[in-house]
Amino acid sequence: MTPGVLHPEGPGSLRGDRAVVTGSARGIGRHVAVELARAGATVTVLDVLDTTDTVELVTAEGGSATGGRVDVTDRAAVTAAVAGAGGDDADLDILVTAAGVYGDSPTLDELTEAELDTVLSVNLAGTLWCVQAALPLLRAGDGGRVVCIGSVAGKIGGVLAGPHYAASKGGVHAVVRWLARTQAAAGVTANGIAPGAVDTDMITGRGYEPDYCPLGRLATPQEIAGVAAFLASPAASYMTGTVIDVNGGYFMG
């Protein structure tokens, strides 16, 4: 097994935890699912795409995962899928929302109603539906953890992304802070990650160059997943309402 950031017997162990990761058929979400499983969690991987490859990857590394095809814009389908992940005792420990789309319009002049609806529906509304479905299950345990994948675009307007993508990720960051403020009494923490450019299919061919940041390279999905695993672990138990910058020094907030 490739060493992960957290060890199932270490201080960040997730052994016995149940986790749901959306957008986990590829990219950041897939690596998050693998990282959580390495730390001992049982992971439900959800995506509008086929999640078979992710489940097989987790299993090959000695972890435990089940998968399903779910469109995060479909509130009823999300509710059913998350409830299924909670099992008979309706208990969930971790939710990571990684489902997202980039959009095709880099400028406001080119933006269409259809594209705006798609990006906001997946990135922002999809995050809200997943959190809405998960909260009762997260509250049922000893304290759940929500980790939302945002973007540097949501903080400074982006590197090359369009205005709708930046707005959707800024909305995700706001959701993180709202959750942290309103759910703390129930023992639920909420944190986010604002990645810079990550070497995934989503930004391939969109003009991102390695020298965009001081570190001189794009991030790997694994580097984002490691931060997500930390935020989902007991090691981050006193963190809530934080959106962590992981951008190679592009933005130092």
Image (cartoon, rainbow, N blue to C red):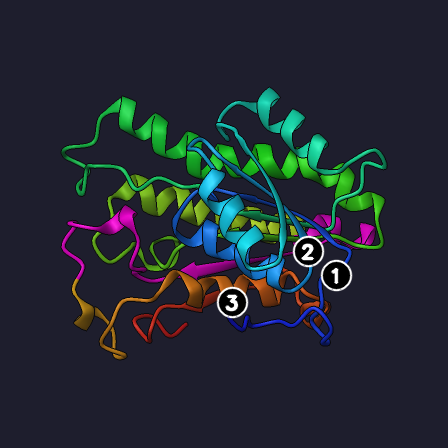
Q: Please give the label number shown on residue 41.
A: 2
Q: Distance between the residues labelled 3 and 1?
A: 16 Å
The reply to whether the C-beta atoms of the residues labelled 2 and 3 are less than 8 Å apart is no
Queried whether the magenta region covers residue 94, the answer comes back as no
* Span highlighted in magenta in the image: 180-208
Queried whether the magenta region covers residue 186, the answer comes back as yes
Task: Say few, some or many: other residues with alpha carbon within 10 Å of mark 1 (under 14 / 14 to 19 / 20 or more).
Answer: some
The quarter of the displayed image where residue 158 is located: bottom left
Q: Earlier in the sequence, mark 3 or mark 1?
A: 1
Mark 1 — residue? 15
Q: Position of residue 115 (x, y in %)?
A: 28, 28
The reply to whether the C-beta atoms of the residues labelled 1 and 2 are less than 8 Å apart is yes
Q: Type of residue at label 3? A: Gly
Q: Where is residue 57 in the image (x, y as percent from the top left)?
A: 49, 52
Q: Position of residue 94 (x, y in %)?
A: 67, 51
**124 to 31, vertically: above or below:** above
Task: Say few, some or many: other residues with alpha carbon within 10 Å of mark 2 (under 14 / 14 to 19 / 20 or more).
Answer: many
Mark 1 residue element? loop
